[in-house]
Amino acid sequence: MGRSFELQNEISVGEGAKKEKHNEGTKTIAETLEAIIGAMYLDGGFDVTKSVISGWYEPHLEKMLKE
């Protein structure tokens, strides 16, 4: 999901890490998305966060259920 939002382009890292493309790593992108979800939860609460995340996954549900 983080890649679909192109989070790797928004993650700020130092020059050395940028050269080694640390901002493009799966773990870094996943942790960034987790931090965004946590911030939404702290700011808006469970119901808001659930609604937003459900909206992210809704277009993919049919494919996910088939797998």
Image (cartoon, helix red, strand yellow):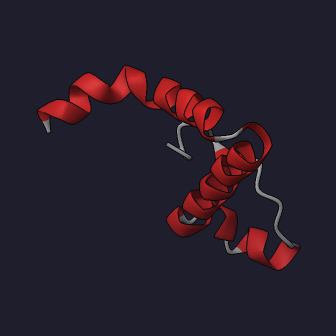
Residue 51: name its quadrant: top right
Q: Position of residue 49 (x, y in %)?
A: 61, 37
Q: Is residue 41 above or below residue 63?
A: below
Q: Position of residue 48 (x, y in %)?
A: 64, 31
Q: Residue furthest left?
A: 66
Q: Is residue 42 above or below residue 16?
A: above
Q: Is residue 50 left or right of residue 66?
A: right
Residue 3: name its quadrant: top right
Q: Is residue 7 left or right of residue 64?
A: right
Q: Is residue 30 above or below residue 61?
A: below
Residue depicted at 24% across the width and 35% down the height: 64
Q: Is residue 11 above or below residue 21?
A: above
Q: Position of residue 17 (x, y in %)?
A: 76, 75
Q: Residue furthest right?
A: 14
Residue depicted at 64% across the width and 48% down the height: 37
Number of marks in the rendered image: 0
Q: Is residue 42 left or right of residue 51?
A: right
Residue depicted at 61% across the width and 63% down the height: 31
In this orientation, which residue lies closer to the viewer: 51 or 64? 51
Residue 41 seen from this side: yes
Q: Position of residue 32 (x, y in %)?
A: 66, 58
In this orientation, which residue lies closer to the viewer: 61 or 46? 46
The quadrant in which the C terminus is found is top left
Residue depicted at 34% across the width and 27% down the height: 60
Residue 21 seen from this side: no
